[in-house]
Amino acid sequence: MPHAFYSSTEYKLKQSVLTRKNWKEGTFDFRYQREKRVCAREACGKEFEVVLSSRNIYCGSSCAASVNNSKRRWTEAVKQKISRSLRGHINPYRGILKTPRIEVICLNPACKKVFIAEQYKARKFCSNQCAMDVIGGQPTSPRAARGKAGIRKDINPTLYFYSRWEANIARLYNYLGIHWIYAPQSFNIGGQMYTPDFYLPESNKYVEVKNFWWRYSMERDQKFRRLYPTIKLEVISKPEYLELEKQYAKLIPMWEYRNSIFL
């Protein structure tokens, strides 16, 4: 039981003054002080930094385990006991899994490698590189977002638009009497294909409808303009599109908004 003296107001006030003074002078900065040590494992010798109160003599758990485990000598009886305890358990590293695996032929024509894959994943390519070699050469990536993709019967019963913005621009061209062709040509821009959304024959220019400018989109645009400097390409980005929507949306039937359901 502590002496009553330590609970007195006089003692507490005195200790408060002393503590405040010592903090200002830096006497009580041991919590922040750190020192450099050399790893105790001979083959390492790495220098590391710890607080003064730390008992670590190794730079990490790997060095500590390599030294401490080397001192352990298991008898044959102990090894047999461990072996019996593990008997009947499936080794997760043996490749024996509950999920069935199948042989798949890579769909990249230049590869056609046979690889093993989990059945539920439905993999078509042996690697990301093979996937991009094929997908990157298609007019529109099959991995593109298609939340509002589909056929708009009020525009054309066969054309498949990949976004509501594309569909609205097509409606705008029809309203203004501008002849347009949807994605008529793909351009090779070095290892990948680029297909602008529209071509306007009367003005001989291509139009790209772009909601977000990702790094990929910007690089693709720069490649196209560098490789095809004589071809006109107009980009309708978000500010331009919203201005057009504000001006024409109420005049054009079936204009799609954020939550519209197209038929």
Image (spheres, rainbow, N blue to C red):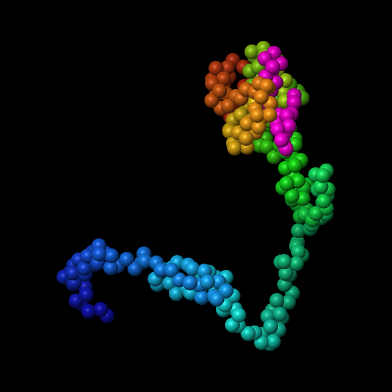
- Residue 60's x, y, as percent? 53, 69
| Residue at x 20% of width, y 66% of height | 17
As drawn, is 26 to the left or to the right of 133? left
- Residue 105's x, y, as percent? 83, 49
**Residue at the limit of the structure toward the left, as seen here:** 10
- Residue 12 visible in the shown view: no
Q: Nearer the viewer, residue 185 or 2?
A: 185
**Quarter of the image containing the C terminus?**
top right
As drawn, is 60 to the left or to the right of 3? right
| Residue at x 24% of width, y 67% of height | 22
| Residue at x 55% of width, y 76% of height | 42
Please tell me whether residue 96 belongs to the stretch shown in magenta: no
Q: Nearer the viewer, residue 41 or 185?
A: 41
- Residue 161's x, y, as percent? 70, 28
| Residue at x 62% of width, y 17% of height | 252
Disc tally is: 0
- Residue 97's x, y, as percent? 75, 62
Please tell me whether residue 199 belongs to the stretch shown in magenta: yes
Q: Which residues are magenta?
A: 184-207
Q: Is residue 136 above or below residue 262?
A: below
Q: In which quarter of the view is residue 224 placed?
A: top right
Q: Is residue 102 above or below residue 28?
A: above
Q: Nearer the viewer, residue 187 or 153?
A: 187
**Quarter of the image containing the N terminus?**
bottom left
- Residue 227 visible in the shown view: yes
